């Protein structure tokens, strides 16, 4: 039974009158677990009371009723054997669940006891869950803990996925914390109760928050908990010994999971430091703009959908992680490339390994289930299959001619001993009558039949023979009774109420003599049911045998589970290696299917991409429906810090400027995670940071206009430029007036050009005046996306040209969109006025022209004198001297 550390005050949300001993017991348990839905076992049902029942009935779509006719207590419930159907819905709705089970059977209850003993055996929250029905197979399910001290800008943070054993810790400023949270997307965050306002201030997301008492967040107790768990003298081996706030948060997570939620954590054998400096940094809004993992548009194709051909859940989670954390280390990138290249060269080895990967289940989450004694017989059977296929993959790699494959094979820990034990005890496949929900747990022994192989236990084999022979005897009795009575359709059936019974049709009752041995038990509309002493005896014999079979099988399975608990160390490293092989083979398939090439890397800070393609657009165009209609136009791009640092890209609307920006970022991201890329050739200098500002939208929830959000995101980029940053900006300044927009865009480009760290920049714009910047700044170049105009119809060639564009063709695009012709005609007349000043070379001349024009327009020619003329000329001269 779990001892809660929560405040045992009355829960204001639930006022249930303790009119019975049962309700009194429920209220006492509910007080210990406030803000928690208590699933209270009453016989074969889990019942929910009061306001909790109202909430759950809506989420689960179950009937809301009253406990008794005269009772005011709301009640909802479902059969206890259906918990796996209902629990996922409650967890996904964001509820914290306490499962309160009966801890004794009615027959074992003492005579003087009024009520059965009950206790909370498990707490399940969105961040602490191991049930596969709730979890997304290809995503981590992280619980996060945050801790900070007053007057400190550093915050400690840790993440734990109890279902896989992944444990991470880190420290950093608010920006660092927000970046990690947005990358790992925890389902639940725990924090000190007194820090509630600050935690809500720094977190701008909808993740469920859970406050804990301050006693959970103690450095000394956290440090002791960690070294006791990992059985080490210090935390130096994990390189986290100086992360005092991080260690405090990590200790709080362990305490919460073990003592509040009652989970065992033997499968957690390491803790890793989250060091963002090792990875390519893509800030949150840039990552969102690139649509790497998700998109605001439900029908959109993300990069993950294109790259993910993984077969195992571990591989699915790993490719997700690689996309969130691309590498900066050239050696590690090249190491991944070498394995990928080796698989491409040895195509014969790919097919057999893929076949084996298809049969591998979630080894990490199976391990977590075994540790917490929640593994079912079915779980043990699929564990056996998984280990067999891992052994086969090891052999395939080891007996290949490749040195790279042999190195991989040696890293896979031999698990033949564990497999042999499982193979010896368990069936090769799951029997048809195997109940997947039967948990191997001392507290919860249920009927488990035919899981254990014959020959493991002589007593078990004898009992099985008893059951088999008794069932054959029942069939013989049925045949005998048919002959004696002459009723060909006489049946012997079974139910939980009567056991075995004889059933005959009513119409035949008067035609035969009912045996004296038959006792009528039930009369229905069309049939009558009878029992006999003989059937009752055989039923009792079978029932006793089945109960004994269940006890023996459960004991064998418990012993098997205990054996597995001692051998868990091999599972974690093996699951990681299988995941890596799975991801590499996924990237191999992408390279083959989409005609990707291997990029080269250099220590210089240059980017050369020849024939680059946007992987998502390329995929969509080459799909079956579109391949005959469209062809993808690839483009070259050469950015060199010392000569071609900044490119200003102009071109008409819909020509593909934004696509070029996204394409460049995604190609670099793919290259630095170790993948092949969509291009003909590429040579890339390692990028440390990618900033991309594309698209415009309001943030009404916090009162930001489109322009304000644009400026906030741009400011964030300009204030965080590092030594090797790639900056991709689209239409900066368009949210305000033309002159303000041009001025801001000009000043930003000028700032980036003169910045000491010389970031690489692609700047897409409709302000054609910016093309003149090449006359003033030596490292700026112009590019444009070509378009042809034939008979007033625009044809987009989507080819990058080495010069600027002077027309946006906005009126033509408006016409294509269906804008009324009267507006199009008027727009054409208005644009003629603006074209009259095309001869002005740059913005400054245009501004000067306006000032001088205003000066002369305000002159009164009749009143002008020689002295006033001289004064006006002096003013004009002084103005131009200042310019």
Image (spheres, rainbow, N blue to C red):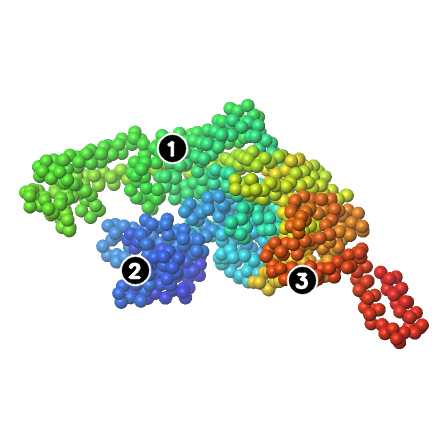
Q: Which mark is residue 449?
A: none
Q: Dot 2, how many residues are within 10 Å of its Cα: few (below 14), some (14-19), or many (20+)?
A: some
Whether residue 392 is visible, yes or no, is yes
- On screen, residue 279 above or below 218: above
Whether tag 1 and tag 3 are in contact, CB under 8 A, the answer is: no
Where residue 468 appears, as percent x and y from the top left, is 22, 34
Residue found at the very far right of the displayed protein: 866
Q: Dot 3, how many residues are within 10 Å of its Cα: few (below 14), some (14-19), or many (20+)?
A: few
Q: At 49% across and 52% down in the image, what residue appears?
A: 187
Q: At 62% across and 35% down in the image, what residue appears?
A: 597
Left or right of 160: which side holds 28? Answer: left
Q: At 43% across and 40% down in the image, what residue appears?
A: 366
Q: Which mark is residue 422?
A: 1
Numbered disc in front, either 2 or 3: 3
Numbered disc in front, either 2 or 1: 1
Q: At 79% across and 60% down in the image, what residue appears?
A: 846
Q: Dot 1, how many residues are within 10 Å of its Cα: few (below 14), some (14-19), or many (20+)?
A: many
Q: CA distance from mark 1 to mark 3?
A: 82 Å
Q: What residue sits right under mark 2 in the picture?
A: 22
Whether tag 2 and tag 3 are in contact, CB under 8 A, the answer is: no
Q: What residue sits right under mark 3 in the picture?
A: 826
Circle 1 — which element?
Answer: helix
Q: CA distance from mark 2 to mark 1?
A: 44 Å
Q: Earlier in the sequence, mark 1 or mark 3?
A: 1
Circle 3 — which element?
Answer: helix
Whether residue 174 is visible, yes or no, is no
Q: Earlier in the sequence, mark 2 or mark 3?
A: 2
Please name whichever residue, 560 or 80, is drawn nearer the observer in this view of the structure.
80
Where residue 498 appears, as percent x and y from the top left, is 18, 47
Q: CA distance from mark 2 to mark 3?
A: 80 Å
Q: Earlier in the sequence, mark 2 or mark 1?
A: 2
Give the total of numbered labels.
Answer: 3
């Amino acid at each position: 039974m779990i001892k809660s550390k929560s405040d045992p005050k009355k829960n204001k949300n639930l006022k249930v009158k303790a009119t019975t001993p049962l309700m009194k017991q429920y209220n006492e348990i509910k007080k210990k677990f406030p803000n928690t839905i208590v699933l209270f076992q009453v016989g074969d049902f889990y019942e929910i009371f009061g306001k909790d029942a109202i909430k759950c009935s809506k989420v689960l779509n179950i009937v809301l009723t009253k406990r008794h006719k005269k009772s005011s207590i709301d009640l909802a419930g479902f059969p206890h054997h259906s918990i796996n159907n209902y629990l996922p819905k409650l967890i996904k709705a964001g509820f914290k669940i306490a499962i309160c089970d009966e801890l004794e059977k009615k027959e074992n209850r003492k005579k003087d006891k009024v009520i059965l003993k009950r206790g909370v055996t498990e707490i399940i929250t969105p961040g602490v869950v191991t049930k596969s029905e709730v979890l997304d197979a290809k995503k981590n399910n992280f619980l996060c803990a945050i801790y900070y001290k007053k007057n400190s800008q550093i915050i400690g943070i840790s993440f734990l996925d109890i279902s896989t054993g992944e444990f991470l810790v880190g420290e950093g400023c608010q920006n660092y914390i927000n970046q990690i949270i947005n990358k790992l997307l925890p389902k639940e965050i725990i924090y000190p109760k007194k820090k509630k306002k600050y935690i809500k201030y720094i977190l701008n997301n909808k993740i469920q928050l859970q406050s804990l008492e301050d006693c959970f967040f103690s450095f000394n107790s956290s440090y002791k908990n960690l070294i006791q768990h990992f059985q080490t003298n210090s935390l130096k081996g994990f390189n986290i010994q100086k992360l005092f706030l991080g260690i405090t948060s990590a200790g709080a997570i362990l305490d919460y999971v073990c003592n509040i939620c009652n989970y065992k954590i033997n499968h957690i054998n390491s803790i890793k430091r989250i060091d963002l400096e090792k990875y390519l940094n893509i800030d949150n809004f840039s990552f969102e703009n690139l649509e790497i993992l998700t998109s605001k548009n439900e029908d959109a194709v993300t990069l993950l959908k294109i790259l993910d051909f993984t077969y195992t859940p571990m591989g699915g989670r790993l490719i997700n992680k690689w996309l969130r954390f691309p590498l900066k280390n050239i050696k590690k990138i090249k190491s991944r490339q070498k394995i990928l290249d080796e698989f491409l060269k040895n195509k014969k080895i790919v097919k057999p390994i893929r076949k084996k990967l298809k049969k591998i289940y979630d080894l990490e989450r199976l391990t977590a289930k075994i540790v917490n004694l929640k593994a079912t017989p079915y779980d043990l059977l699929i564990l056996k299959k998984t280990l067999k296929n891992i052994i086969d993959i090891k052999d395939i790699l080891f007996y290949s001619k490749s040195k790279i494959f042999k190195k991989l094979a040696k890293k896979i820990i031999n698990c033949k001993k564990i497999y042999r034990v499982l193979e010896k005890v368990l069936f090769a496949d799951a029997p048809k009558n195997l109940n997947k929900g039967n948990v191997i747990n001392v507290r919860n022994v249920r009927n488990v039949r035919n899981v254990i192989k014959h020959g493991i236990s002589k007593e078990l084999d004898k009992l099985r023979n008893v059951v088999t022979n008794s069932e054959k005897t029942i069939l013989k009795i049925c045949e005998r009774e048919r002959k004696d009575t002459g009723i060909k359709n006489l049946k012997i059936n079974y139910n939980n109420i009567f056991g075995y019974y004889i059933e005959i049709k009513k119409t035949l009752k008067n035609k035969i003599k009912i045996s004296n041995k038959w006792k009528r038990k039930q009369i229905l509309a069309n049939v009558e049911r009878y029992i006999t002493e003989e059937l009752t005896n055989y039923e009792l014999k079978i029932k006793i045998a089945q109960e004994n079979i269940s006890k023996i099988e459960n004991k064998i399975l418990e012993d098997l589970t205990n054996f597995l608990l001692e051998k868990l160390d091999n599972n974690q490293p093996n699951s990681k290696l299988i995941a890596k092989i799975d991801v590499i083979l996924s990237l191999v398939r992408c390279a083959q299917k989409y005609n990707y090439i291997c990029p080269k890397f250099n220590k210089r800070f240059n980017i050369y991409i020849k024939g680059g393609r946007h992987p998502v657009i390329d995929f969509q165009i080459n799909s079956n429906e579109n391949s005959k209609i469209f062809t993808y136009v690839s483009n070259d791009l050469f950015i060199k810090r010392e000569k071609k640092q900044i490119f200003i890209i102009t071109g008409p609307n819909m020509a593909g400027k934004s696509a070029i920006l996204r394409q460049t970022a995604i190609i670099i991201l793919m290259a630095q995670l170790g993948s092949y890329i969509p291009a003909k050739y590429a040579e890339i200098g390692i990028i440390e940071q990618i900033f991309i500002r594309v698209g415009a939208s309001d943030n009404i929830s916090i009162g930001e206009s489109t322009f304000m959000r644009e400026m906030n995101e741009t400011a964030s980029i300009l204030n965080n430029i590092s030594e090797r940053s790639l900056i991709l900006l689209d239409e900066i300044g368009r949210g305000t007036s033309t002159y303000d927009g041009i001025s801001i865009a000009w000043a930003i480009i000028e700032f980036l050009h003169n910045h000491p760290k010389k970031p690489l920049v692609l700047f897409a714009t409709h302000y054609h005046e910016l093309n003149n910047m090449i006359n003033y700044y030596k490292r700026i170049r112009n590019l444009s996306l070509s378009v042809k105009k034939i008979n007033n119809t625009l044809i987009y060639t989507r080819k990058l040209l080495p010069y600027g564009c002077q027309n946006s063709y906005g009126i033509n695009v408006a016409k294509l969109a269906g804008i009324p012709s009267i507006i199009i005609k008027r727009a054409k007349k208005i644009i003629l006025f603006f074209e009259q000043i095309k001869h002005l070379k740059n913005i400054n001349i245009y501004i000067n022209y306006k000032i001088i024009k205003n000066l002369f327009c305000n002159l009164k020619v009749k009143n002008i004198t020689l002295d006033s003329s001289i004064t006006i000329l002096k003013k004009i001269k002084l103005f131009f001297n200042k310019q």
